[in-house]
Image (cartoon, coloured by chain):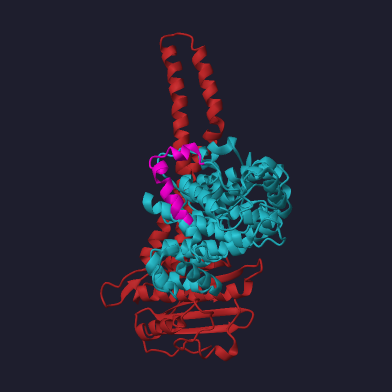
Amino acid sequence: MGGLAAGIAHEINTPIQFVGDNTRFLQDAFRDCLEMISAYEQVYRKAQEAKPALQELEQVAEICKRIDWEYLRLEIPKALEQMLDGIERVAKIVRAMKEFSHVNRSSEKTAADLNKALESTLVVGRSEFKYVADLEVDYGALPPVMCYLGDLNQVFLNLLINAAHAIGDVVKGTQERGRIVVRTRQDDDYVEISISDSGTGIPAGVREKIFDPFFTTKEVGKGTGQGLTLARAIVVEKHGGSLTFETEIGKGTTFYVRLPVSGSAEPREAVAK
Amino acid sequence: MTRILFVDDEVKILEGLQRMLRPQRSEWEMAFAPGGKAALTMLEASTFDVIVSDMRMPEIDGAALLEIVREKYPNVLRIVLSGYTELEASYRAVPVAHQFLLKPCDPDALRGAIHRATSLIEVLNSMMLAGLVGSLRDLPSVPRTYAELRRVMEDPDSSIDRVVRVVEQDVAITAKVLQLVNSAFFGVTREITDIKTAVAYLGIAILQNLVLSVEAFRMFRPKKKISGFSIEEFHEHSHLTARIASEIAKMAGSTDALVVAGLLHDIGKLVIAEKSPDHFARAIEGVEQDKKPLFSIEEDLIGVSHAEVGAYLLSLWGLPSPVVEAVAHHHHPERVPHGSLDMISVVYLANLLAHEHAGNEQEESPPGQPIDPKVLAIPGVAAKLPEWNSLASMIAREPEGAGHV
């Protein structure tokens, strides 16, 4: 999670940087504008007294030129717009983090909108994939699902990070980008969430082991080998769902999370399709 | 006019910088590239003095970009402005960046970093105009272990053990540091055999400074033998100066940074001896002919001396400005006002005393240089001088007093 936190920090630091720069700009610009307005006030006073204000107008012209009013009048609205955009970006990330780290207040399952949950997971995990892959989402209409939402968010994030790493292994050192597709659909009493990547695919020899505790093919520091084990425990044992995958070497992998809408069913074993 | 190229994949960052830095437009010519590729195209089309780049970018990231810039455009100063606090990212950038800034970056810090780089460009330009070197700008970036130590120390979660691990990764550095720690320098009474104990005795700040000087000294290896200049004597003199400086400082309120200022005050000599051996040999010949100190011969030849070159290097490496100033002015304390015994005057005095009492024949600096009246006027200096003088003579005569770095 350390890497993820750094990624989120980066996502937040970027807008904060440009909001700060623009604020500094507006501070300078406002000081310039004030100078110009006071010059105009001189003109106004002369006009009120019906006196010629040629000298004052020259002063106004001089200030406009010096502060580059033509530039300021164009840039100030853009700066404001980008500041609002930056603040919205930070707010979106903070909102998503709040939703993502949803704490189950009671030990009971609660009804949740999984499309919305996926949306915040994608915001939280964006820094993990945005340099290697394009994202495509295809949300089907889903009924509220009885679940432990905080746990499921962890599952989704885990699958997303795995997808990003699998693509990273393929595009590393090239200028290519991969593709992650997130789909949801309802299937009778179940909902199915699938996360596909255009990554390396899982080699035949390790397909049976990927859910084993501490099994990992990732280099040290990139994974603990616990992610899929935990994910399966959450999906199968806590929700009576299933966690399966389809994979093809060189094409990529799709993980399917199937969950009963009611929140319980006979637990099914995870198997490779 | 300084030409600066800003690189970031986020266009809004570039536009924000452009607006914020607009007041600088009379002194800076700024260009903005929305990514590594665009930056390389712009570098090909026109010349720049400074590049300020983001780290994480698609296609060509900051570390890769700066690596190319170092190879193809060694004259361009490289600054990283990164949103990542991630250590991995900064480690990758350290070898290729002269300075490292973190987003969100306070505008004054950014302006300060660029000003620091540009004021040094002026010093260098005067050296280049004088025909000193073609490639002096291609200086090595911050020494790796020192840079890693700095990062570890900035991390509030770090521990002594992490500091120790960073140093011990490099066996040669560990050995040299322990050798220094056990020399008469620090007056440690029992032998210290590991870095952890050394930290406990001396503190992390001193350790960091020792690591830096060890790395800096081994970084420059003059290929040509220059008559009248000996690396061994150079090391001895650096060491002696640092010792005298810290003894003087003990009486005047000590600072850890003095050790590093003392050790590295002449680092510019190594830089010039490696990068421009002919010029250096000429300057040393001049010392013998004219019976004047090296720095003034260098100044006669090209307008600046090893002091400025050394300060330039240390400033590129981001050392605190008191250290940089002490190195820059160690022959010219009169350039700055002194209210009290500051680092500049201490290093200046220690350097003079070290030359005065050096056991060997210091060809580069004939003894008997008068002490600058401005320094003599600092309260307490005139009174203490005889004491420091005999102290320096005592330290210089200690058998292991100088020790090699």
Name the residue at 53% across, 38% down.
A75
Residue B133 in view of the camera: no
Residue B15, placed above or below residue B154 = above
**What is the quadrant of residue B143 in the picture?**
bottom right
Residue A142 left/right relative to B264: left
Instruction: State whether the magenta stretch is mostly helix, strand or loop.
Output: helix
Chain letter corresponding to the colour cyan:
B
Q: Residue sitting at 59 percent across and 45 percent down?
A: B120
Q: Which chain is red?
A: A
Q: Nearer the viewer, residue A121 or B234?
A: B234
Q: At which x and y percent is residue A126?
A: 49, 65
Where in the figure is residue B75, as x and y percent of width and height? Answer: 67, 51
The quadrant of the rendering that contains the N terminus of chain B is: top right
Residue B356 in the magenta stretch? The answer is no
The question of residue B375 being in magenta is answered with yes
- Whether residue A134 is visible here, answered yes or no, is yes
B273 and B128: which one is in front? B273
Magenta part of the chain? B371-393
Residue B213 coordinates in the image, percent (x, y): 53, 61
